[in-house]
Image (tube, rainbow, N blue to C red):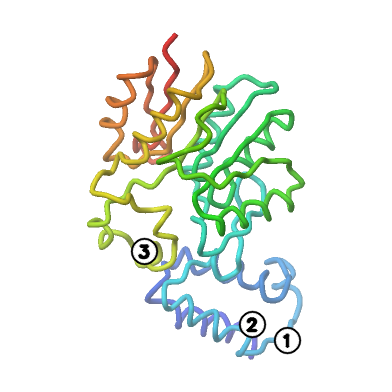
Amino acid sequence: MTKQALRKWFNDRTDKVLEPSEQDEIFFRLVEFIYQKNQLQWIIEEPEIEEEDWEEIIAELENDKPIQYIIGKEWFNGMEIVVDDHVLIPRPETKELVDWVTETAQNGEQNFIDIGTGSGCIALSIKKAWPEANVFATDISSKALNVARQNALRQQMDIQFIEDDILKSELVHNEFDVIISNPPYILPKERNELSRRVKSYEPSIALFTEVGNALQFYKAITAFAIKTLSEHGYLFFELHEKYAEVTKRMCLEYYEDVVLKEDIYGKQRMLRATKKR
């Protein structure tokens, strides 16, 4: 099969599940994954193309499996992050939250904790920005923590990973200068509103609340922060835009200088709160 024939076959097979703009990006990500060649190398060289190398992968794409789970990685904040179906796929909105944290918090030997770390992308980004910081990362899922540990090892970063359920956390006797979380906030009844890529492949434990309360985990983390946040500490949340205002009102009961921040799409997706003096 020629390169031109492969590209036409790929486009024809994925036409119903991928947008035209996605087809270009995903095709060349798969070229790199299968042949270990970048786009320029692919153009100038003549690799040996076997249809069977692509058949299973294209079938997975036809079933809406995210490309990140197919190739087992995603780029985040300049780092190659290992992912599998035990962790959420790192997203650009989370990078915006990380940027806000690093713009706000003071550099130095501070204690950071990332609650519900998943792949570890937030914790890794904090450690990348401040190597001298003490970074802790928790998750209820031991399988997610295994992925996060693998990422820390690949990045040669020293992060303390802890299996912990924030709804009954055992870490309430610690003190942290910055608490960060992108917790579950989707109600089980909203499952059908999600794309097939998300609801069929990303881990439900990281997406959905356990009860009919979208603020379940925000309330638990807020209560945790009341006990553990240092005198001048900050609490950061990633939010669903439709819960932004109600989360802010909840935080104003316990914190001062509660600020919502829009993402690049103009949606209120982030919150920062400062502990009351």
- The residues bearing labels 2 and 3 have C-alpha atoms spaced at a distance of 34 Å
Q: Position of residue 176 (x, y in %)?
A: 56, 25
For marks 1 and 2, the one nearer the N-term is 2
Q: Nearer the viewer, residue 113 or 94?
A: 113
Above or below, comparing residue 121 to residue 181 in the picture: below
Q: Residues within 10 Å of mark 1 (few under 14, many from 20)?
A: few
Task: Provide the residue designation for mark 3.
Answer: 199
Identify the amino acid type marked 3. Answer: Lys
Task: Provide the residue designation for mark 1.
Answer: 48
Which residue reaches farthest top? 277
For marks 1 and 3, the one nearer the N-term is 1
- Of circles 1 and 3, the one toward us is 3
Contact, mark 1 vs mark 3 (Cβ under 8 Å): no
Q: Secondary structure at mark 2?
A: helix
Left or right of 275: which side holds 4?
Answer: right
Q: Which mark is residue 3?
A: 2
Q: Which residue occupies 50% across, 40% down?
A: 115
Q: Residues within 10 Å of mark 3 (few under 14, many from 20)?
A: some
- The residues bearing labels 1 and 2 have C-alpha atoms spaced at a distance of 9 Å
Identify the amino acid type marked 1. Answer: Glu
For marks 2 and 3, the one nearer the N-term is 2
Above or below, comparing residue 256 to residue 24 in the picture: above
